[in-house]
Amino acid sequence: MARSKRQPSDPAEGVAKKVTIYDLARHTGYSPGTVSRVLNNRDRVKPETREIILKAAKELDIKPQASVRSRQVAILSEPTYSDRIEGYAATLTAHLSFAFTRRNFGIVLPSDPFEQLPGMFLDGIVVVTFDSPLLELVSEFEKRLPVVFMDKFDSTEGRYRVCSDHYRSGRLAADYFLAHGKKRPAYFGGEGQAFAERLRGFRDALEAAGHPVDPRLLVQASRDEHHAVVTRLVRTGADSIYVPGTSFQAMECLHLLTYVMGLRVPEDISIIGGENDGISNIQCPPLTTIEEPLKNMAEAAVDMLDDLTSGRPHTERERVLPVRLIERNSVL
């Protein structure tokens, strides 16, 4: 007698039944094609249909295999920051988008992460910029998805991050000013962790050189206070200012000094800024800057998420990439 084939196990036997896209289609009443489009973040699906299918997929714990679909990642930037349109976040987002596309990732750029992220089916997230509420939202996703942070300098135990060496940026700027005989070098940076790292490096370089540190010349403030801060630094006797950041901060400072205060750069006061590729070198005068490796940072973050979303081991949780000083004509 021929041996009968063993029938598939059912839940009653203690083995979980594998749920498929076809099961989800039967469960929701939509076609397998529509279900597949939703799970793979494709277009031409009504929002209410997408919501129903995603809710059911979560209830049934169904997820298409990464080997048969495009991996989907979200690139997040803080909605309240202006540089998500132009500047640091926008430039880094562009580099990330190109790098992910070359590896056949699908990418989403939520305009409102708080409204849109909960309804998305994602394999991973890259966080470019964030404020506290967005960080809290991402922390919930971290429990089930790999997340890579850009330029996160506070406690990062267990987190993946890619940073440029902002501490080194501060040291390079201060050392360069001192090497050019500056007696009253000043620092003016924005709020946040990256700017605090630069300030720490700037202060340490002054102290290491035995140079007096005047706290009135070391300022962290919001972008809205730019005019008041620059004016105060000049009145306090600054003969040089390091204005870090890749969102045109140094160009704002140059405009204030030249066209509002009537000073000459570099004859009356010197500036070192953050590099804005293709723009810093055509200012009047061309700006001496410290360049962050934004393209290399993006590639490193994509390397991390590629490994993490494909099941390959990735033991390196943190990468800090070097910066470089570009000499031009804004320091005398």
Image (tube, rainbow, N blue to C red):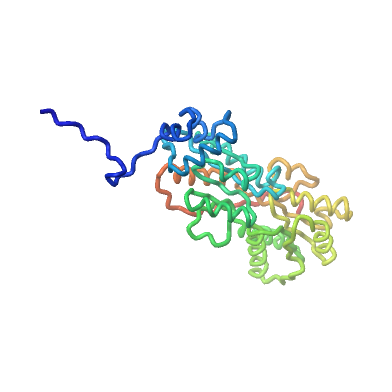
Q: Which residue extends farthest left?
A: 1
Residue displayed at 80% across by 45% down: 284
Q: Nearer the viewer, residue 136 or 92?
A: 136
Residue displayed at 10% across by 28% down: 1
Q: Nearer the viewer, residue 249 or 205?
A: 249
Q: In x, y percent, where is residue 271?
A: 76, 55
With respect to residue 88, does 107 lie above or below?
A: above
Do we see residue 322 in this rendering? no
Residue displayed at 48% across by 34% down: 28
With respect to residue 17, does 30 lie above or below?
A: above
Q: In x, y percent, where is residue 328?
A: 72, 48
Q: Is residue 292 left or right of residue 142?
A: right
Q: Is residue 115 left or right of residue 122?
A: right
Q: Quadrant of residue 119?
A: top right
With respect to residue 263, does 63 lie above or below?
A: above
Q: Quadrant of residue 8?
A: top left
Residue displayed at 54% across by 31% down: 42
Q: In x, y percent, where is residue 86?
A: 71, 43
Do we see residue 195 in this rendering? yes
- Location of the C terminus (image quadrant): bottom right
Q: In x, y percent, where is residue 154?
A: 57, 61
